[in-house]
Image: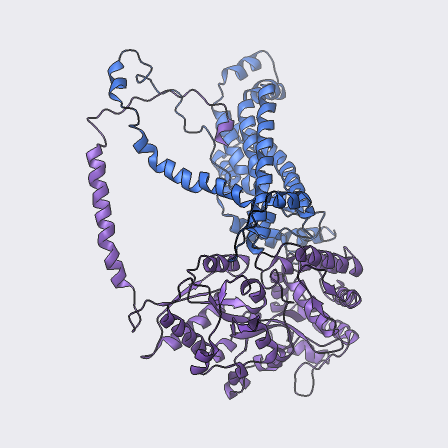
């Protein structure tokens, strides 16, 4: 789950603007020939077209063919791949797993991040220690995170079951039990990535004007009242941002699950992207894998639009 | 994704005046200088690469040997690189598993693959029919002293597709048992020569497990299979082949599996790993760690773990996977050399590739020190090999080798092995019955067989 950089984070908000919209300097506009800036965006456009637009178009084309990784003639198969995908129980179960993971992980990743940010912002002693402790796991690469947790979850020697044993409880098949594995994967993900959302919330909290809070305090509002009625409403925009980024990031889950469980036990943690990888690369069927990934792509777009609508309406 | 957020009005910063900053001429100048630098380094870089004696570039070789195996391969390459006829080898090591096979397939599909590559023999059926491999010239190999007679029939028969040889085996690497010789002695499992005595029946292996558990005071027979994509299948395939039943995957399906025999095997595996004389929920590394830490009498693993276990200090014995059903059979795979497809192969380089493979397989004694059984039989006859302990004690495993049933989707690091392992894991953990697990295995095999074949 490679979380993208916060959007809109680097936009200069209060830069003075003597440029284009300043009426005093019309000469500058006339001196700018159309197409002048093209030279500067050309490298970006080239890379964008080559590595994003072209693969997207080519992938769509492939989803209508029986393209194979092996040397073989490719032929056009129409909607065959899509028909097969709709009838493939593995597509549905892996989509279900992706949805389950998204639901299980997004909620704590927003709420825990908020709780941690509020704790730190409330003036806990030793601020930098908390900030570091909450954010540090996010800096670890996925391989390190999964290695650590594989040992913690180790059925026999792992810390998890050792602790349970000390308490006189039965060992748990953290990654082996179909009913537990998805929760285990979610716990790893929350531990690993919550720091990013925490940082977004903390930054938002620190930029809130203190005046409302002080006014409410003067009016006799208690801490909880001020949190509910003053602070949280002001954090709305951040919550929207965090929630949207989180849902999209969770939908794209692949690497930690692939390393931790390979999608097991019995396919109970296999996300749809792993299925695409399995059929496309280890199974050579690139055409079919493209069709499944386009179905997923359509689903992600629908979710994004729905989210956007929902939050707009709320606003 | 970015477009889904309401854009904030961005105010324009003042445009930089022409007087300061970067000028167009400056960009051109630095661009030209950069291009000049690139041109200048090109030929220099060419000089720096070591060319072989013939003036051709190095022989490119891809393999998946890391760690101890990787170092041994380096040693073997050094050995064949020495002298006036030595090779100049450009070796690329890639990570084992699906990623290696994806890259190998893509490079061959592109027609510009390496001169030589390593392939698990179980993977051949997914590579040769699709045109991803070029055939060997057996006459050329014979010229360099390597021929069909040098390999056991069980392995040689798997090097071909449609009557043509596409692979030259380097080793046979079976799934075997390692045991703690002291614990086995205490449990009364050794023959007068100090080697593990034959078992002969399922009950004998179950009893051995109990006796070993008593001897160590901890676990009897260890087996790491949780979240693993191959281990359960290796064990199942070994035991299933011992029943004498066949497991075939004809194109288009349905799979031909003797369900009764399969249930019998899974049922036995459940008894063997019932959690009483062993923890039945270990993962691969957990099993190794337990055995290396003296917390088990026997461990079922691939022979390639020999170097790791030797370092542990446990008094180590090794034996072929015990025969408990009707006939001997050992699950095996084989690292073999192949010629990945090249669009325009240079005849001289192809000749060199044949000569290289012939030379390397003759270096198999070095390779055997890691635990692998050399596929090249003349090496097995050498006294130095007999002196290798415990390697020589399971050398016969190559003769009763059972590989994956051939089909395009099977083999090392494949979806097939993973999908067979999942129901078996559920059965060993007690989450499902042997019958249900076997039924699911048949279903999974059937659904893989019903897919359109992407290599035909």
B296 or A279, which is in the foreground? A279
Indicate left or right for B78 with B444 as reference: left
Q: Is residue B249 visible?
A: yes
Q: Is residue A123 visible?
A: no
Up the image or down, A32 lies above or below B234; here it is above
Indicate left or right for B28 with A200 as reference: left
Q: Position of residue B283 (x, y in %)?
A: 64, 60
Q: Position of residue B207 (x, y in %)?
A: 77, 74
Q: Position of residue B324 (x, y in %)?
A: 74, 75
Up the image or down, A18 lies above or below B172; here it is above
Q: Colour of chain B?
A: purple
Q: How is the image coloured?
A: by chain
| Quadrant assignment, res B216 | bottom right
Indicate left or right for A211 with B239 as reference: left
B96 or B169, which is in the foreground? B169
Up the image or down, A5 lies above or below B144; here it is above
Q: How many marks?
A: 0
Chain that is blue in the image: A
Up the image or down, B310 lies above or below B422; here it is below
Q: Position of residue B145 (x, y in %)?
A: 45, 83
| Quadrant assignment, res B85 | bottom left
Locate the C terminus of chain B and report the quarter of the image it occupies.
bottom right
Residue at point 80%, 66% (across, down): B260
Residue at point 61%, 24% (across, down): A310
B152 or B303, which is in the foreground? B152
Residue at point 35%, 21% (across, down): B12
């Amino acid at each position: 789950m490679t979380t993208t950089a916060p959007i809109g984070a680097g936009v200069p908000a209060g830069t003075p603007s003597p440029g284009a919209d300043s009426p005093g300097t019309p000469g500058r506009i006339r001196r700018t020939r159309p197409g002048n800036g093209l030279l500067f965006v050309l490298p970006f456009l080239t890379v964008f077209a080559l590595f994003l637009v072209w693969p997207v178009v080519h992938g769509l084309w492939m989803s209508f063919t029986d393209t194979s990784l092996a040397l073989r003639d490719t032929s056009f198969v129409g909607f065959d791949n899509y028909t097969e995908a709709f009838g493939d129980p593995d597509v549905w179960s892996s989509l279900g797993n992706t949805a389950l993971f998204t639901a299980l992980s997004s909620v704590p990743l927003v709420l825990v991040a908020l709780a941690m940010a509020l704790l730190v912002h409330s003036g806990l002693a030793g601020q930098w220690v908390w900030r570091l402790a909450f954010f540090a796991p996010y800096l670890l690469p996925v391989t390190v995170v999964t290695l650590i947790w594989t040992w913690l979850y180790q059925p026999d020697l792992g810390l998890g079951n050792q602790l349970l044993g000390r308490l006189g409880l039965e060992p748990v098949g953290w990654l082996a039990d179909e009913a537990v594995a998805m929760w285990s994967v979610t716990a790893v993900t929350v531990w690993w990535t919550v720091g990013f959302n925490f940082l977004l919330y903390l930054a938002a909290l620190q930029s809130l004007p203190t005046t409302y809070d002080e006014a409410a305090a003067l009016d006799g509002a208690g801490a909880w009242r001020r949190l509910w009625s003053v602070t949280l409403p002001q954090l709305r925009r951040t919550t929207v941002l965090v929630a949207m980024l989180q849902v999209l990031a969770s939908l794209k889950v692949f690497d930690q699950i692939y390393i931790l469980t390979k999608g097991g036990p019995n396919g109970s943690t296999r996300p749809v992207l792993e299925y695409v990888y399995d059929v496309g690369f280890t199974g050579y069927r690139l055409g079919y894998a493209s069709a499944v990934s386009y179905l997923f792509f359509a689903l992600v777009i629908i979710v994004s639009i729905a989210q956007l609508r929902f939050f707009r309406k709320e606003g | 994704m970015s477009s889904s957020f309401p854009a904030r009005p961005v105010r324009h910063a003042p445009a930089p005046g022409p007087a300061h900053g970067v000028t167009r001429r400056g960009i051109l100048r630095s661009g030209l200088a950069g291009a000049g630098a690139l041109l200048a380094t090109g030929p220099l870089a060419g000089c720096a690469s070591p060319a072989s004696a013939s003036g051709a570039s190095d022989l490119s070789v891809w393999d998946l040997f890391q760690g101890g195996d990787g170092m041994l391969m380096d040693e073997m390459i050094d050995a064949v690189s020495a002298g006036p006829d030595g090779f100049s080898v450009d070796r690329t090591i890639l990570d084992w598993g699906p990623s290696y096979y994806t890259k190998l397939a893509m490079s061959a599909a592109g027609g510009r693959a390496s001169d030589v590559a390593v392939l698990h023999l179980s993977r051949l059926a997914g590579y040769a029919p699709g045109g991803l491999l070029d055939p060997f010239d057996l006459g050329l190999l014979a010229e360099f002293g390597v021929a069909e007679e040098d390999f056991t029939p069980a392995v040689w028969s798997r090097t071909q597709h449609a009557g043509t040889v596409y692979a030259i085996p380097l080793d046979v690497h079976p799934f075997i048992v390692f045991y703690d010789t002291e614990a086995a002695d205490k449990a009364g499992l050794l023959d007068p020569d100090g080697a593990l005595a034959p078992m002969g029946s399922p009950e004998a292996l179950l009893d051995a497990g109990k006796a070993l558990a008593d001897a160590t005071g901890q676990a009897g027979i260890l087996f790491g299979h949780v979240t693993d994509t191959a281990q359960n299948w290796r064990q199942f395939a070994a035991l299933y082949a011992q029943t004498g039943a066949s497991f075939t995957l004809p194109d288009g399906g349905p799979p031909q599996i003797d369900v009764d025999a399969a249930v019998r095997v899974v049922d036995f595996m459940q008894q063997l790993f019932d959690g009483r004389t062993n923890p039945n929920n270990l993962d691969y590394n957990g099993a190794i760690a337990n055995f290396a830490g003296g917390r088990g009498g026997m461990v079922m693993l691939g022979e390639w773990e020999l170097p790791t276990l030797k370092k542990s200090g446990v008094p180590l014995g090794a034996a072929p996977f015990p025969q408990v059903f009707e006939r001997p059979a050992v699950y095996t795979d084989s690292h073999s050399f192949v010629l990945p497809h090249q669009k325009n192969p240079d005849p001289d380089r192809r000749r060199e590739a044949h000569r290289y493979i012939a030379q390397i397989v003759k270096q198999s004694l070095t390779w055997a020190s890691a635990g692998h059984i050399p596929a090249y039989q003349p090496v097995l006859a050498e006294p130095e090999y007999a002196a290798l302990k415990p390697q020589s004690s399971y050398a016969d495993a190559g003769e009763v080798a059972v590989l994956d049933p051939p089909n395009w989707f099977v083999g090392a690091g494949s979806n097939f092995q993973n999908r067979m392992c999942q129901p078996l894991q559920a059965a060993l953990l007690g989450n499902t019955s042997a019958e249900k697990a076997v039924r699911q295995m048949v279903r999974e095999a059937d659904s893989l067989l019903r897919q359109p074949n992407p290599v035909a």
